[in-house]
Amino acid sequence: MRILVVSDTHRQNGNLCKVLAKVGKMDMLIHLGDAEGSEDYIREIAGCPLEIIAGNNDFFSSLPREKEIEIGGYHVLLTHGHFYNVSFTLERLREEAGERGMQIAMFGHTHRPVIDQGGAVTLINPGSLSYPRQEGRRPSYIIMELDREGVAHYTINYL
């Protein structure tokens, strides 16, 4: 199973289109917020099931602010992250996800990619495809793959 994880496209969907062409067929697309009204367009171009939540800039959106989903045998929390102050610390998100029985918490908001497997809850942030903030400022996304045994593997990728 291959899952494309993106966030913070901010209605600038050109790089998302490039990524979709580059990665080929995916089993799922996860968008972690700040699509800013592009959710119908993203659903249209995804070519696979879409899970999408609202971010702090999705002002008039009816999207949920969080979702709990199953990916393989994993319980996964999808959140934009701003309600957990992820710009300052990841511990509040890790604690909340753990208390809710999640093994993975995916978030956006910071525009910086992260794969943090240093605890009971794996924290994943794909960065931003439109306005990256990490050193080098390259648009980023994550591909999550479940191997034959159902074990998750993650790679940060750049355009």
Image: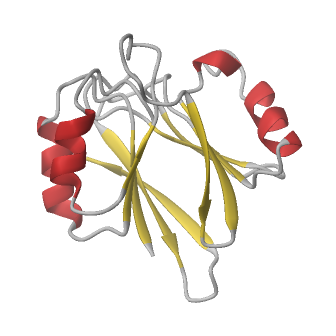
Q: How far across and down, in percent of the image, does residue 65 sit?
A: 54, 27
Q: Is residue 62 above or below residue 113?
A: above
Q: Is residue 6 above or below residue 96?
A: below
Is residue 19 visible from the viewing direction of this image? no
User: What colour scheme does the image use?
Assistant: secondary structure
Tell which residue pokes out farthest to the front in this image. 62
Is 92 situated left or right of 147 in this image?
right
Residue at 25 percent of width and 28 percent of height = 130
Q: How far across and down, in percent of the image, does residue 4 sit?
A: 37, 56
**How many numbered marks are there?**
0
The picture quadrant where one finds residue 92 is top right
Is residue 35 visible from the viewing direction of this image? yes
Tell which residue pokes out farthest to the right in this image. 99
Residue at 65 percent of width and 17 percent of height = 83
Is 104 situated left or right of 14 in this image?
right
Is 36 situated left or right of 102 in this image?
left
Q: How far across and down, in percent of the image, does residue 134 sit?
A: 42, 27
Residue at 75 percent of width and 55 percent of height = 103
Q: Is residue 60 above or below residue 105?
A: above
Residue at 46 percent of width and 59 percent of height = 155
Quick one: 135 or 33, which is closer to the camera? Answer: 33
Quadrant assignment for the N terminus: bottom left
Is 85 situated left or right of 56 in this image?
right
Q: Is residue 105 above or below residue 58?
A: below
Tell which residue pokes out farthest to the bottom in this image. 148
Q: How far across and down, in percent of the image, does residue 16 sit?
A: 20, 43
